[in-house]
């Protein structure tokens, strides 16, 4: 049985994702598809425009058989840890034969050469030297690899290629039996902020919805026709959630939390907590805060991830612990009839528990305990992320506790 796994955000699911899904099936000949998607906060350090159950439902209606949740402690991370979390989670299912991922340059040999070069001792040492000079990880890696290999450095700096070779590194370290399948990006550029064609970036779609006040006609051509009515219905009930919706909450945290708490946030170093504290007193919203802090050393995306970690009270000690142990559960968000067959197989082969009912493993009282298992602690972060996320709704629908009430979405084919 061939089962292709995909690690994604589907924020929201669009024509580019449909192309990738179709190509993944065609290249691998897989009978089944599984996608591990971010929960309520993304790798860019932003809330997802729709909640995780809505995004999972759209993906299943668009052709994915089973959707599982990538825990928050991996979802809101740099490419390396996002990839490791996703690969380890898919591998824990015990059924994945292939992992398909997008790449600007889908040449597997080149991507694997970059992946191997990234682990080269000389490259790692030079990488540290370049980063100490104040440039970003991606740019430093590009220059370090170019110095010790004949690889074209322009291939490295593409965001999709960075994730691609991080997936390859993770597969090599944690799931060598899984076959990697790079799929060429089609038409769109991941950095595009405006809709230019039927296939465009998720960022362009979110920006268009935000700036045009949920004018759905402006994005209609970018969404598969079979799921557009469902997307329109979701947005009519709960308008999209954006980072600016949390401006006051995050500024409150930065202004009131002691520096000893801020210094323990993941990805904080070199006195960045002092800069955050000072900038928060001068900022009137998150945009002004980001403008004051971002630099060549501290990219906007890195700062946004730090802000989400502050919002969710995630510490560097926690992420370090979970990086070591790996995903502790398989959280089911949605599936179709084919996905239900997959679940029967997964039940007998999974390396970690399968969660369809949260209260079987954690309830609102247990998550207040100091003594929790690793599973409960990881799940606590996910459930609290949901409770915080709903505060970003513009309408009066921001109730908490949804993880304890919502069940997986079942789509009957």
Image (cartoon, rainbow, N blue to C red):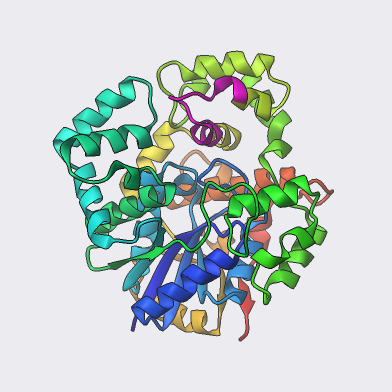
The image shows residue 169 at horizontal and vertical percentages of: 27, 52
The image shows residue 299 at horizontal and vertical percentages of: 49, 30
- The quarter of the image holding the N terminus is bottom left
385 above or below 147? below
Stretch of the chain drawn in magenta: 291-306
At horizontal 35% and vertical 72% (from top left) the residue drawn is: 96
Q: Magenta-highlighted stretch: main secondary structure?
A: helix
Quadrant in which residue 57 is drawn: bottom right
- Residue 288 painted magenta: no
Q: Which of 384 and 269 is in front in this view?
A: 269
Judge left or right: residue 127 versus residue 230: left
Q: Which of 298 and 38 is in front in this view?
A: 298
At horizontal 40% and vertical 63% (from top left) the residue drawn is: 184
- Residue 296 painted magenta: yes
Tell me if I can see residue 144 in this picture. yes
84 above or below 58? above
């Amino acid at each position: 049985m061939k089962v292709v796994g995909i690690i994604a955000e589907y924020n929201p699911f669009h024509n580019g994702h449909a192309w990738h899904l179709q190509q993944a099936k065609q290249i691998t000949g897989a009978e089944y598809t599984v996608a591990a998607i971010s929960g309520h906060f993304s790798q860019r350090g932003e809330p997802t425009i729709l909640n995780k159950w809505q995004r999972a439902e759209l993906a299943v209606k668009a052709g994915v058989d089973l959707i599982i949740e990538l825990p928050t402690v991996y979802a809101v991370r740099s490419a390396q840890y996002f990839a490791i979390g996703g690969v380890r989670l898919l591998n824990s299912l015990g059924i994945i034969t292939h992992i398909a991922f997008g790449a600007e340059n889908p040449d597997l040999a080149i991507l694997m050469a970059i992946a191997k070069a990234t682990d080269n001792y000389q490259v790692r040492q030079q990488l540290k030297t370049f980063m100490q000079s104040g440039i970003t990880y991606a740019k430093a890696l590009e220059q370090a690899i170019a110095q010790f290999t004949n690889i074209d450095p322009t291939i490295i700096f593409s965001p999709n290629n960075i994730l691609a070779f991080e997936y390859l590194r993770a597969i090599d370290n944690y799931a060598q039996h899984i076959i990697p399948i790079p799929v060429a990006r089609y038409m769109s550029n991941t950095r595009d902020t405006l809709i230019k064609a039927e296939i465009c970036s998720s960022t362009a779609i979110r920006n268009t919805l935000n700036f045009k006040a949920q004018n759905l006609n402006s994005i209609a051509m970018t969404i598969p026709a079979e799921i557009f009515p469902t997307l329109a219905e979701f947005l009519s009930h709960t308008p999209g959630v954006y980072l600016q919706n949390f401006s006051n909450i995050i500024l409150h945290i930065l202004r009131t939390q002691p520096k000893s708490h801020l210094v323990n946030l993941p990805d904080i170093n070199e006195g960045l907590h002092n800069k955050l504290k000072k900038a928060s007193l001068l900022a009137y919203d998150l945009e002004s805060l980001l403008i004051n802090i971002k630099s060549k050393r501290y990219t906007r995306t890195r700062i946004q991830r730090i802000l989400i970690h502050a919002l969710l009270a995630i510490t560097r000690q926690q992420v370090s612990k979970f990086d070591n142990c790996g995903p502790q559960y398989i959280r089911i968000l949605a599936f179709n009839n084919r996905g239900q067959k997959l679940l029967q197989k997964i039940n007998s082969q999974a390396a970690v528990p399968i969660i369809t009912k949260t209260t079987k493993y954690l309830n609102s009282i247990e998550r207040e305990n100091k003594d929790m298992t690793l599973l409960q602690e990881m799940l606590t972060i996910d459930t609290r992320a949901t409770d915080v996320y709903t505060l970003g709704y513009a309408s009066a629908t921001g109730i908490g506790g949804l993880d304890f009430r919502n069940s997986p979405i079942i789509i009957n084919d």
